[in-house]
Image: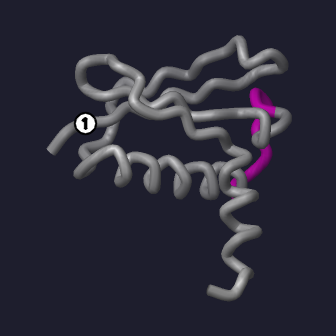
């Protein structure tokens, strides 16, 4: 299975990057996107962070094993996704 790395982009001007040195083995890009969204929910539900003042201004830059960025997942995506969860199918 391919390995994906979830680097956290944050800061007032998104100038800071917390690098994920280990990554996670996931089936494909879609699985990586879903993993990023769940990680975002977990971070936002956890205790306050001294380094991150506004989670909704952050994003995950997801790279594959070749260090190619395959996805950028803004933390604000969980808000619009949660809003759509209440809509009838």
Residue 49 lies in the magenta-colored region: yes
Residue 17 shown in magenta: no
**Residue placed furthest toward the top:** 15
Q: Of helix, strand and loop, which one carries label 1? A: strand
- Which picture quadrant has residue 67? top left
Q: Quadrant of the N terminus?
A: top left
Residue 84, quarter of the rendered image: bottom right
Instruction: Please provide percent x and percent y for residue 87.
Output: 72, 81
Q: With 89 as the anchor, is 19 left or right in this view?
A: left
Viewed as shown, does residue 64 lie left or right of 74? left
Residue plotted at (67% across, 76% down): 85
SS majority, magenta: loop
Q: Quadrant of the C terminus?
A: bottom right
In the image: residue 29, left or right of residue 35: left
Residue pictured at 27% horizontal, 47% vertical: 28
Front residue (pair 75, 43): 75
Query: For the view shown, which residue lies furthest in the bottom direction?
Result: 88
Q: Quick check: 46 left or right of 2?
A: right
Q: Which residues are magenta?
A: 45-52
- How packed mark 1 is, by other alpha carbons closer than 10 Å (few <14, some 14-19, many 20 or more), is some
Residue highlighted by disc 1: 3
Image x and y of residue 13, in percent: 80, 15
Which is more toward the observer, 5 or 33? 33
Place of residue 3 in the rendered image (x, y in percent of width and height, measured from the top left):
25, 36
- The residue depicted at 48 percent of the width and 21 percent of the height is 19
Q: In the image as oriented, which residue stretches furthest toward the front?
A: 89
> Which residue: 75% across, 58% down?
79
| Color style of the picture | one colour
Circle count: 1
Dividing the picture into quadrants, the one containing residue 58 is top right
**Vertical placement of 39 versus 17: above or below?**
below
Relative to 4, residue 78 above or below: below
């Amino acid at each position: 299975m391919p390995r994906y790395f979830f680097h956290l982009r944050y800061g007032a001007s998104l100038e800071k990057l917390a690098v994920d040195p280990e990554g996670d083995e996931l089936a494909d890009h879609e699985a990586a996107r879903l993993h990023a969204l769940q990680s975002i929910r977990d971070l936002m539900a956890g205790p306050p962070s001294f380094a991150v003042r506004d989670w909704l201004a952050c994003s995950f830059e997801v790279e594959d094993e070749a260090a190619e960025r395959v996805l950028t997942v803004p933390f604000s995506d969980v808000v619009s996704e949660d809003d759509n969860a209440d809509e009838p199918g």
